[in-house]
Image (cartoon, coloured by chain):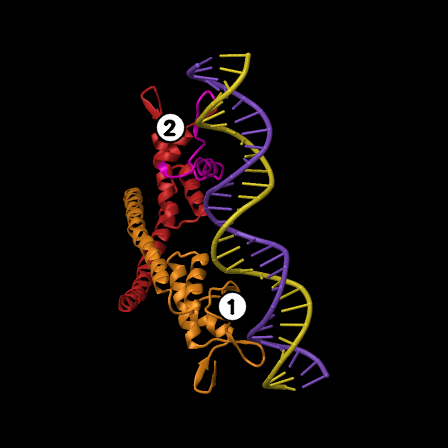
Chain colours: A orange, B red, C yellow, D purple
DNA sequence: GGTTGACTTCGAGTGCGCTCGAAGGCGCAC
DNA sequence: GTGCGCCTTCGAGCGCACTCGAAGTCAACC
């Protein structure tokens, strides 16, 4: 962690630690256009992650871990990068994703219930056998 | 659909329709050992899916769509195929899976909440702009 | 008996999302 | 000055879960 002109910045290893991603994944995301722009560099050429960077990366991981494909995260990043004026498109993308997730959650819950039922059956059986 | 000696059996296309899988996936699952045993054949060599087959395939899809990897579904199928005596192992496998899913559901819900928040922000912004 | 269409096997191909490794640079401790 | 550790780029490789296509069989219908 380094502090310059009142700003805290993280090395890639620290950013990885902070976000739960690997350093490889962080570079990959940057290459692949998932970040808003190229991460700043120290004079050594090493990446320096700002708080803004981390905030955005956390948003990316939220989208990813709710199942949004990389391709779509990139689309979203492209829109944000393009600046003001496309809020409606961003909204549409997020809403479509939200609706998908909202549909899946109860489905998964239902499947889980069925699995629990199976577990109950086995528990009763193994208890009886004991 | 065909009926022989009081038993309803389905062609692979019908089984695909009934389970939401593709015919390709059904053959793949069978090849890969996810089914309990080889599906019966008509005299023509065509697969004939019984109600039992469909029941098992539905269990497989429940496991799959809650995120269990193919490899693990195969392990479970192997145990069931081995017959009585390993119920404890099956139970262990299912419980481990259940616990994983139980942990993920609220996490996804939390991420979803954060995304909803973002959506609210955009909605307020696009309304204001209008 | 010819055509149609649903099926068969087999192996190769695809898309996704990383993951890994090689080869090299930079700065600091000893 | 030399080792060490952390970083860099680049491109190849991998695991997963199908998906696809070619080539052939079979039964039924016209």
Number of the label disc, if any, that sits on residue A23: 1
Q: Quadrant of residue A72?
A: bottom left
| Chain ID at mark 1 | A
Q: Is D24 drawn above or below residue B96 in the view shown?
A: above
Relative to the observer, which residue lies in front, C10 or B112? B112
The answer to whether residue B126 shows anywhere in this view is yes
Residue A100 in the figure: left or right of residue D24: left
Residue A23 falls left or right of residue B51 = right
Q: Residue placed at 45% from the left, 64% from the top? A: A78
Q: Is residue A93 above or below residue D20?
A: below
Check disc 2 and report the residue beneath it.
B10
Camera-nearest residue between B86 and A89: A89
- Classify 10 Å Cα crowding around label 2: few (below 14), some (14-19), many (20 and above): many
The crowding category of the residue bearing disc 1, from other C-alpha atoms within 10 Å (few below 14, some 14 to 19, many at least 20), is some
- Looking at the image, is A18 positioned above or below residue C17? below
In percent of width and height, residue A59 lies at: 39, 66
Query: CB under 8 Å between callouts 2 and 1?
Result: no
* Alpha carbon distance from label 2 to label 1: 50 Å
Measured as percent of width and height from the top left, residue B89 is found at 39, 46
Q: Quadrant of the N terminus of chain B?
A: top left
In this rendering, does residue B87 appear at all?
no
Helix, strand or loop at label 1? It is helix
Q: Which residues are magenta?
A: B19-44
Most extreme residue toward the front is B130
Residue B35 falls within the magenta-colored stretch: yes
Host chain of mark 2: B
- Look at the numbered disc 2 and give the secondary structure of its residue: loop
Q: Is residue A48 magenta?
A: no
Q: Position of residue B29 (x, y in %)?
A: 45, 39
Disc marking residue A5: none
Please state which of residues A21 and A36 is positioned toward the viewer in this rendering. Answer: A36
């Amino acid at each position: 962690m380094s502090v310059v002109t009142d700003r805290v910045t993280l090395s890639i290893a620290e950013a990885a630690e902070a976000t739960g991603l690997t350093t490889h994944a962080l570079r990959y995301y940057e290459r692949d256009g998932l970040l808003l722009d190229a991460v700043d560099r120290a004079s050594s050429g090493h990446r320096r992650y700002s708080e803004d960077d981390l905030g955005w990366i956390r948003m990316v991981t939220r989208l990813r871990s709710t199942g949004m494909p990389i391709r779509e995260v990139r689309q979203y990043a492209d829109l944000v990068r393009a600046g003001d004026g496309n809020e409606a498109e961003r909204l549409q993308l997020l809403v479509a994703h939200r609706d998908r997730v909202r549909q899946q959650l109860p489905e998964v819950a239902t499947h889980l219930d069925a699995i629990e039922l199976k577990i109950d059956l086995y528990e009763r059986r193994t208890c009886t056998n004991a």
